[in-house]
Image (cartoon, coloured by chain):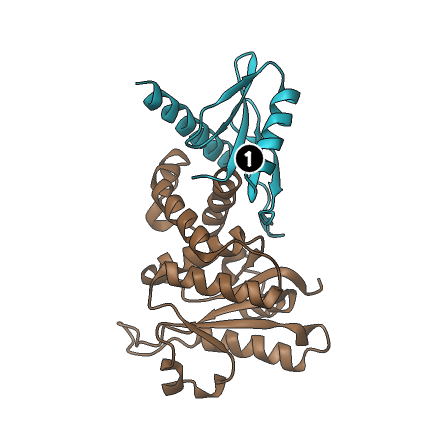
Chain colours: A brown, B cyan
Amino acid sequence: MPEDSDKVFINCPFDKGYQPIFEAIVFSVFDLGFSVRCSLESDDSGEVRITKIARIIEQCKFGVHDISEVKLDKVNRLPRFNMPLELGMFLGCKRFGGKIQARKICLILDTEQYRYQKYISDIAGQDIRAHGNKPEAAIVAVRNWLASASKRKLPGGAAIASRWKRFIVDLPELCIKARLDRKDLIFKDLTDLILAWLENNR
Amino acid sequence: MSKTVHVFPAGTVWKVAREGGKPTVYPTKKKAVGEARSISKRFAPSQLVIHGKDGHIQEVVSHGLPSIKRPPYLKKNSRIQRIVGKFTLSRLASERRADRA
């Protein structure tokens, strides 16, 4: 499948602590009229994970990469390198993937604006924004970047953040009605709920 | 204030409503959709949603808002759509009850 200018690859931590920002980014990408792609989208155990990620990256013109999780894992006392690895794959695809892949554009998110210089300084020159661990700030960063990168007329960040807040209020009740566990919502259920909610409540 | 204009059946008639607004009643679906379309255009950017009998969505029309794009891996989930549709319409109804009280 060729690269698609409506698809946004999301590369970010999937742990519970990051969930509010992940949900906010997914919500804002859909609300902006783009389609979310990420490694959680299918559970095909027959496909090697890195192959699946490469396939998704190849199909997406845009990429949001959150490299904020640089802290050490509590159990193993080691950092997780998946996000920098997938960012590297995205940049490599852009650099070596030919004419179409060269059009790829990415946004790099971190907690603080210049913290990356201390642990991954080679990405200097990319579009790096800070979200301060605040979902609303992540929404505004994604909106402003996509508006500029896609050159489309998009709703403002404040309007999307306001809709996202309403969605978050409705979500627990919707989960009860749908017999889903709000605290353990899988990606497919989350996207189904976001899409249905946006179709009803923008 | 929601940017969505809803058209939905209510017994033998059709209603047009926005969250926070007063619903209007029409004898036919065609007339209700026509009116909802003009309201949605007037308040653009907005969207018009036409519901079926059980709250499910028959059609969504955007006026100045980006259209929602379903990813290729995600088939339409009618069950979730019905649940969210019913939830939204019941909220519209409860707002109206609160207004009358």
A15 over A30 or under it: above or below = below
Q: Residue at x 41, y 63 (%)?
A: A138
Would residue A48 be seen by someone viewing this image from the given angle? no
Q: Residue furthest top?
A: B12
**In the image, residue A21 lies at what x, y percent?**
38, 60
Q: Name the one closer to the observer, A79 or A33.
A: A33
Residue shown at the point (35%, 37%) measured from the top left = A173
Q: Residue at x 59, y 68 (%)?
A: A149
- Quarter of the image for the N terminus of chain A: give it: bottom right
Answer left or right for A93 relative to A183: right
Q: Position of residue A124 (x, y in %)?
A: 48, 85
Secondary structure under tag 1 reads helix
Residue B89 vs residue B39, the one in the foreground? B39
Q: Position of residue A79 (x, y in %)?
A: 35, 78
Q: Is residue B98 above or below residue A9?
A: above
Q: How many residues crowd mark 1 within 10 Å: few (<14), some (14–19), many (20+)?
A: few
Question: Which chain contains the residue that carries disc 1?
Answer: B
The residue under the point 44% across, 61% down is: A140
State the residue position of label 1: B78
Q: Please state which of residues A187 and B21 is positioned toward the viewer in this rendering.
A: B21
Looking at the image, residue A112 lies above or below residue B14: below
Residue A163 percent location from the top left of the image: 43, 47
Task: Tell me if I can see residue B42 in this picture.
Answer: yes
**Which three-letter amino acid code belongs to the residue tagged 1?**
Ser
